[in-house]
Image: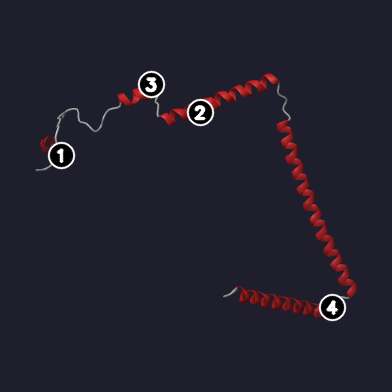
Amino acid sequence: MKLKERKSIAKGFQKLRVALETEDKEEEDAQDTRSRSQKRRDDKARRQAEAAARKAEARRQAEQEELEISRKKKAGAERVTAAELLLRREMEIREMERLAEEKDRKMRRVVTKGEYENVILAANTNRRDDDELEAGTVDESIHVMITLGILKN
């Protein structure tokens, strides 16, 4: 469908909806046995109730915002001396330096002495201690694998 066709269909539906709404309103007015003054009073009462509901909602939102603002003020109203501020800044700087050092160490792949010892002392599971046979060439390694039973002839 082209854009013009869709717009014309949408306009048709809009006209149909408006026509149905006006027809429903006319039927409702025809069935309503109340007097004109009674209808006006009912409409006025309905509008007042809606206005009261809007005001109550606005009041509730305003109270909630004031409560949030007061909470923020209480949290930020803490008094701090210059020495405490300086101490906090120094601690933040130390923490930032420590994080930067860790990041740099990871980037350079430098390990600490303890990490190095853990790697050295770890047992090599790829090698059997009881069978230490070495081979320098492919033929020798095939022969060693046959003698160990890893490779079948």
Does dot 4 land on a helix, a strand or a loop? loop
Give residue 105's position: percent from left, percent from top. Answer: 44, 27
Residue 11 circle label: none
Residue 88 occupies quadrant = top right
Residue 100 circle label: 2
Does dot 3 land on a helix, a strand or a loop? helix
Tell me which label, 3 or 1, sits earlier in the chain.
3
Residue 52 occupies quadrant = bottom right
- Residue at the spot of label 4: 33
- Vertical side of 150 occupied by 78: above or below: above
Tell me which label, 4 or 3, sits earlier in the chain.
4
Label 1 neighbourhood size at 10 Å, few (<14), some (14-19), many (20+)? Answer: few
- Residue at the spot of label 3: 113
Q: Nearer the viewer, residue 95 or 42?
A: 95
- State yes or no: discs 4 and 3 in contact (Cβ < 8 Å): no
Q: CA distance from mark 2 to mark 4?
A: 82 Å
Q: CA distance from mark 4 to mark 1?
A: 102 Å
